[in-house]
Image (tube, grey):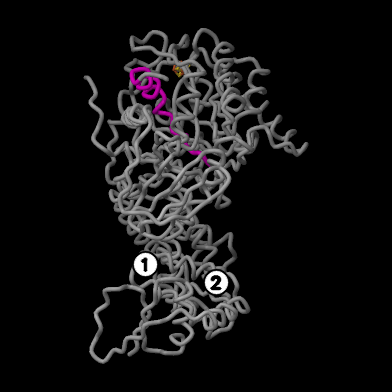
Amino acid sequence: MIDAERLKILTESAKYDVSCSSSGSARANKAGGIGNGYAAGICHSFTPDGRCISLLKILLSNRCSYNCLYCPNRADADVPRASATPEELCELVMAFYKRNYIEGLFLSSAVERSPDYTMERMTDAVIRLRKVYNFNGYIHLKGIPHADRRLVSRAARYVDRMSYNIELPSEKSLLLLAPQKSKESVLLPMKQLAEEKREDMEAKKHTVLPAGQTTQMIVGASPETDSQILRLSEAMYRRFSLKRVYYSAYVPVVRHASLPDKCTGLLREHRLYQADWLMRFYGFSAEEIAPDGENLPEAYDPKCAWALRNMQLFPVEVNTAPLEMLLRVPGIGTMGAYRILKARKFASLDFADLAKMRIVLKRAKHFITCGGKFCGAGSDASVRTLLALGSREETYEQLSLFSTPELAASALTGQL
Amino acid sequence: MNLYLTDGSEEGFFTAAFRACTDADCVVTSARNVQLAAGAELIDVQTDAERCERVRRFLRRYDARSLGEISLLLRRGCATKEMTALGYLRLIVQRRAPVRDMLAHPAVLEAMSEIKKVTQEAHRFKGFLRFMECSNGIYYAPFEPDNDVLELLFPHFARRFAAMPFAIHDVARQKAMLSDGRRRMLVHTEEKVDIPLSEGEQTMQALWKEYYASVNIAQRPHEKQMKGYMPVRYWKFLPEKQEEPKRPQ
Ligand code: SF4
């Protein structure tokens, strides 16, 4: 069994990765095996920073031969180093899983010796878990850039999800801050995996990445605007059918002339997640949310910002508006919109009904009428001011919602 | 005013509901410590299979799904659960049709939000339940849920740990469900059970605490959020929330 000291080193090196979600896979338990996937994801604990623990997030090794400037484990850094063997890792996963500490494994690694050597050891660990330990729980495997494509295909048949991190929002920044990685070394495997998954689904085998692919980028370490970032996400969602793009506000762990020395505000990360939700669940395009060259406004959420730019479309009548339009009303989330669709079949809804149905009227009232009645503020200027004031109070509460993907899914939809 | 006192079972509730449904100003409860108001008459409900079945048949006919909903409502850990269920039932009787989409009606709203508290707690414990390896090889998980969710939770673990012997113990309600991989059993228990742990159990708990401490980002404390998602009353059985491991600087 792995000792506490190495566990600590290998965990601390992995903890900044934000994609801890265990959702999207309903892998069944096979006869005699241990574990299964749970499609909605499960949080097993919460750390004092408010984040959810779902998977055992760990590196196989932090001995890196690469030199990404922002990374505490880069080759040039003077930090304690450790590796675990695939066997030690399997034992730890099984022991934690049987006690219900975790939903599965999120395995990553520094580039130890070479990309192929590293990818091989990681693949060895996950295949061992599946075949020797009969483990059917969730596995998320990080892809190593430049690793042989056959190794990547092989691994993809044993895990639920893989992620190649795009790391930075432009090729230029990637080259500057992560010189050994390249756009191709990340995007080509993503493309390859997307194709393999498509073929696998067409053949109805469902063995390749049942929970799909995700990626992650660091926001604020480089100068790209939110509109650039969102366009990149939109393109990746479309081209590689990604399940999620994770945004991680830059935390300076390393000092360097090419790096900012301040943390990126959590508010910026939060606004990006809100915008991302709007693209995935509310029918917005990146273009609508953030006009070219602009950042998302901090003063209010991106849906409010869009509505304020398009006041000519409002107010809409709650009792007759189509779903697509209800979804665009600030304050009415997907849950709220569906609740309205159901309830208005029985009776015409007034403001009191909406309040009873837990529709947050604070923002919505400026954009809707109920049976022709309007209760919002009189002028665009006052709507703007009121929304900005309201958002200042809510920011703190809402920020929290986004750092836990699973819970966010249910809590959030009602919020935007 | 009539006060119907039931034994807390679903059958008891349906028996009481048979009359209470049309008894406008009444109270149905299974709480043992009710204060009887002046002028109130206590009716000790004896479960009656015939009456119970008639109410159930009615529901099956007009809205079969509501049977499951009422069963969830009766798992709430609060004294007014029978009244919430009765309010919902009355509305179905009145309309002779499903009412769950009438989300602006107070009775429906209350029923739905109470059901959510039950299913949400059951879901939470899929994550928060903690097993310990006992010296006889059985994995044992004690817990104290607010609502009676043991039976709702059990199938999840029965699927997940199909080949592993385990027991889940609702300490406060003094009952446990066991699975040895093939058979499943519900047993009544004492409040305290003494179970010797396996040799490796303390080591694993220590490693888990080490992991918990290491994965936290100390520069970004957000205690309030942690407690919001993982309420303090659930900490009792979480090894990671027992005293911190001593860490050398
Ligand atoms: S590859 Fe780059 S980011 Fe990954 S561990 Fe090595 S230096 Fe860090």
Is there any visible trace of residue B170 in the rendered image? yes
Q: Chain of mark 1?
A: A
Nearer the observer, A375 or B86: B86
Instruction: Tell me the number on the disc at residue A336.
Output: none
In the image, what residue type sits under mark 1?
Ala
B58 lies above or below A37: below
Separation of residues labelled 1 and 2 (CA atoms): 42 Å
Crowd rating for badge 2 (residues with CA inside 10 Å; few <14, some 14–19, many 20+): many
A206 lies above or below A121: below
Instruction: Tell me the number on the disc at residue A377.
Output: 1
User: Which structural element holds mark 2?
Assistant: helix
* In the image, residue A21 lies in the stretch drawn in magenta: yes
Picture quarter with the N terminus of chain B: bottom left
Asked if ligand 1 lies within 8 A of label 2, the reply is no
Nearer the observer, A202 or A284: A202
Is there any visible trace of residue A235 in the rendered image? no
Residue A378 in picture, x, y percent from top left: 37, 68
Residue B212 is drawn in which quadrant?
A: top left
In the image, what residue type sits under mark 2?
Ser
A352 lies above or below A242: below
Q: Which residue is mark 2?
A: B66
Q: Answer yes or no: do the residues labelled 1 and 2 have beta carbons within 8 Å?
A: no
Q: Residue at x 52, y 26 (%)?
A: A165
Instruction: Give, as a single range, the part of the protein colored magenta.
Output: A4-23
